[in-house]
Image (cartoon, rainbow, N blue to C red):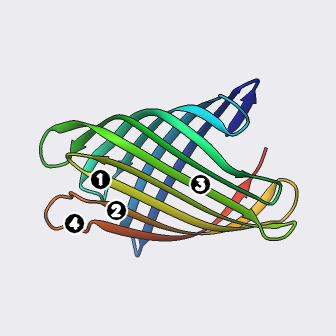
Amino acid sequence: MKKTQDKWEHNAGLAFLRSTNAGVTSAERFQLTGQSDYAIDEHSYYFGSLRYEDDKFSGFDYQSSVTGGYGRKFIDTEVATLKGELGIGYRQTKLETFGSEGDAILRAAMNYTRNLTDTTSFSNDTLVESGSNNSFAQNITGLSVRINDSMAMKLGFEVRYNSEVPVGLKSTDTITTLNLNYKF
């Protein structure tokens, strides 16, 4: 969801992923995100961002972060957009095996979109949150084809990485998705 008002732009997102095969669950993740941007000029802005994630197969009960910083629109045309963000913040992580830990983090993000045709667009979103306890990175690449004014099909490929995971779990996870998106 997105709302723009004067110099402010507010974005909120909710994602849920669940995968089962023959009654066995192999993925279950809930993610909630929010960000508010305040325009300094037509290309620069300050941002405040929140991220909460509960992934049953990551080895963490949850990871949550709050960050703030500076963003810049490098390309902002009808055909393409490219923006980058750099900020600092704090992340709280609750481990499945024992306790919780918090640390200061550096946050970097890069978002690129390009309209390939009137109905087809490409996107690539990268997020990195790095602290002394763990570095988290996420890259989502997507190809979206608009069906009509309010619906689109999207093919996505996501790579997620945590530098420090509990013993027996992999640091990298990949997900391929086919989604039906509704715009209202």
Report crowding for label 3: few under 14, some 14 to 19, many 20 or more residues within 10 A (C-alpha). Answer: some
Residue 74 visible: yes
* Relative image position of residue 125 (x, y in whole percent): 55, 58
Q: Secondary structure at mark 3?
A: strand
Q: CA distance from mark 2 to mark 3?
A: 18 Å
| Kind of residue at disc 2 | Tyr
Q: Which residue is mark 3?
A: 111
Q: Which dot marks residue 169?
A: 4
Q: Which residue is mark 2?
A: 161
Q: CA distance from mark 4 to mark 1?
A: 15 Å
* Relative image position of residue 94 (x, y in whole percent): 23, 41
Depth check, mark 2 against mark 4: the one in front is 2
| Kind of residue at disc 3 | Asn
Q: Residue 136 or 181: which is nearer the viewer?
A: 136
Q: Which dot marks residue 135?
A: 1
Determine the residue positioned at 24% across, 55% down.
Answer: 59
Q: CA distance from mark 3 to mark 4?
A: 29 Å
The reply to whether dot 1 and dot 2 touch (C-beta < 8 Å) is yes
The reply to whether dot 2 and dot 3 touch (C-beta < 8 Å) is no
Q: CA distance from mark 2 to mark 4?
A: 11 Å
